[in-house]
Amino acid sequence: MSRLEQTRAALGAAGVDALWISHPANVRYISGFSSGSDGKALVTAGEAVLYTDARYTVQAAAESALPQFIARPPGTYEDAASRVKGLRVGFEAEHLTVAGLEALRRHWDAELVPTRGVMEGLRLIKSAEEVALIREAQAIADRVFAEVRPMIRAGVRELDVALELEMGLRRAGAEVGFDVIVAGGPRGAMPHGVASERVLEDGELVTVDFGARWRGYHSDMTRTVAVGTPSEEMRRVYRAVLEAEQAAVAAVRPGMKSGDLDAVARGILEEHGLGEAFAHSLGHGVGLDIHEGPGLRMGTDTPLEPGMVITVEPGAYLPGVGGVRIEDLVLVTDMGYEVLSLTPKESV
């Protein structure tokens, strides 16, 4: 079944006749248009249209699997109004702005219905083509990390490590997937400690979290590495997080509930007295967005399915001391799992 056919089937399940798609990743997913932030898509039972503006006339024609409407007077809303008149039209409540909703109400003679997760539900299971793109994004990140690892040493700024990672991704033809995290020593206690001017020191752990974006699809990986010989306490923390990460990866299989996978890692860290130090969920899905479904957190019951691509990233963060996070990118397969992030984990 094509993406458009799947979307139309999802409309029925959502109780709407049409869907106005505004989230950039969802616009790209349904249309192929890579500048989704400057586009919208409308899907009805009988047609589907990509809306953008005259800056993208050539690009949209080259990329989009949908017919395009290039916004000139009459504009986007006016054209769409003729297609949705009298229909029950869903809009993406988590992505459409208040101003955007007001514009729809002003121009359309249609019943507007908030929807959540319609397109995101379709994106949970990756096609073989999507998996190949994610796999390549991760392979690029693995190669770049191997090139940069030798410079992670005492006397080097976090920013310089991040810059080398970003330049490596660019040289490989990829985009930088998100703000690069390089957090050494006490800054390792910040889960989202993006690179700063701090100079790395001997005897500390350094958390590096980065990813590539390749033809729209992301990779995501974290490694915590040692500069010199860390304290015995931080080595203990590292070993506990590594144990939790490896156990959670080994537990990945179709049918397992996402919350239960979180519990595997969380239980091990609790046994090591680090339960309170694990300050976030175990992981998330990865695809056109760096963070997408399924969410791997306590209390969620989404079953894992073949074709999902997830992160497994337990961490432990000790304020004023440091932190450890280890993250793999994992494909759920028919028989279990495949780890896509091949950068070795260090012995600390």
Image (cartoon, rainbow, N blue to C red):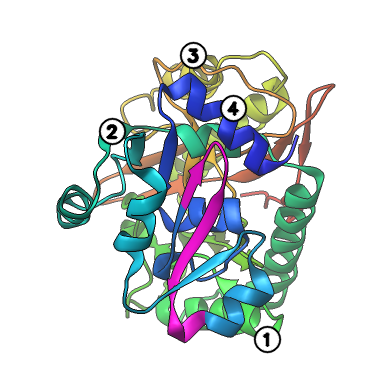
Q: Secondary structure at mark 1?
A: helix
Task: Look at 19% across and 56% down and name the residue there.
Answer: 103
In the picture, residue 280 is in which quadrant?
top left
Query: Could you tell me how far apart the alpha carbons at marks 1 and 4 are, in whole angstroms?
Result: 41 Å
Q: Which residue lies under the disc numbered 1?
A: 171
Q: Earlier in the sequence, mark 2 or mark 4?
A: 4
Q: Secondary structure at mark 3?
A: loop
Q: Which residue lies under the disc numbered 4?
A: 9
Q: From the image, give the main secondary structure of the stretch colored magenta.
A: strand
Viewer-nearest of labels 1 and 2? Answer: 2
Q: Which residue lies under the disc numbered 2?
A: 114
In the picture, residue 182 is in which quadrant?
bottom left
Query: Could you tell me how far apart the alpha carbons at marks 2 and 4 are, in whole angstroms?
Result: 17 Å
Viewer-nearest of labels 1 and 4? Answer: 4
Q: Amino acid at mark 1?
A: Arg
The answer to whether residue 147 is left or right of residue 264 is right
Q: Position of residue 345 (x, y in %)?
A: 68, 50
Q: Which residue lies under the disc numbered 3?
A: 301
Q: Earlier in the sequence, mark 3 or mark 1?
A: 1
Q: Earlier in the sequence, mark 3 or mark 4?
A: 4
Q: Magenta includes 227?
A: no
Magenta region, residue range = 42-56
Q: Amino acid at mark 2?
A: Pro
Q: Magenta includes 44?
A: yes
Front residue of this view, candidates 322 and 335: 335
Task: Look at 42% across and 75% down and name the residue there.
Answer: 158
What crowding class fits label 3: few (fewer than 14 Cα within 10 Å), some (14-19), or many (20 or more)?
A: some
